[in-house]
Each structure stands twice: as structure tokens, then as C-alpha cells.
Amino acid sequence: MPGSSNEFNWTYRLPAPIEEIVKDKELLAAVAELSKIKPAPRKKNVGA
């Protein structure tokens, strides 16, 4: 349920702390390549 806090929340965890993940040069290169293939989504015009 959205907004709840219990043992079922956040069941999908990263395999390592983010501080370690960002040091992985091979992973960062792969992410950079993927970002070239799939452009960032267009922002929705929230104020309109």
C-alpha cells in the first residue's frame, strides 16, 4: 500500500551501497551507452 511503512516496503535493494556502485567504471560506461540509445523522457508541462 502506498505510503505505508512495513517489512514489505523496499523489497528490491541494490546489490551494493551506491557509493560502491558509482566507482564501477564498467557499469558507468554501460549506463552511458544505454543513455545514448534511449533519450531521457520529455518533461510534462505541469503548470499548464
Image (cartoon, rainbow, N blue to C red):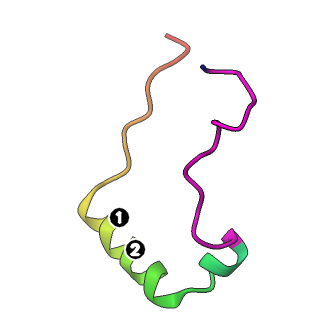
Q: Is the Cβ of the residue at disc 1 closer than 8 Å to that at disc 2?
A: yes
Task: Check disc 2 and report the residue beneath it.
Answer: 32
Dot 2, crowdedness within 10 Å: few (<14), some or many (≥20)? few
Per the image, is 1 magenta?
no
- In the image, taking residue 29 as reference, residue 36 lies left or right, namely left
Inspect the image, locate mark 1, and give the three-letter code of the amino acid beneath it.
Ser
Which residue appears farthest toward the right when viewing the image?
Answer: 5
Q: Could you tell me which quadrant the N terminus lies in?
A: top right
Task: Check disc 1 and report the residue beneath it.
Answer: 35
- In the image, taking residue 6 as reference, residue 48 lies left or right, namely left
Give the residue drawn at x 31%, y 68%. Answer: 34
Per the image, is 13 magenta?
yes
**Front-lying residue, 3 or 31:** 3
Inspect the image, locate mark 2, and give the three-letter code of the amino acid beneath it.
Ala
Dot 1, crowdedness within 10 Å: few (<14), some or many (≥20)? few
Q: Which mark is residue 44?
A: none
Give the residue drawn at x 49%, y 10%. Answer: 48
Which residue appears farthest toward the top when viewing the image?
Answer: 48
- Which region of the structure is painted magenta? 2-18
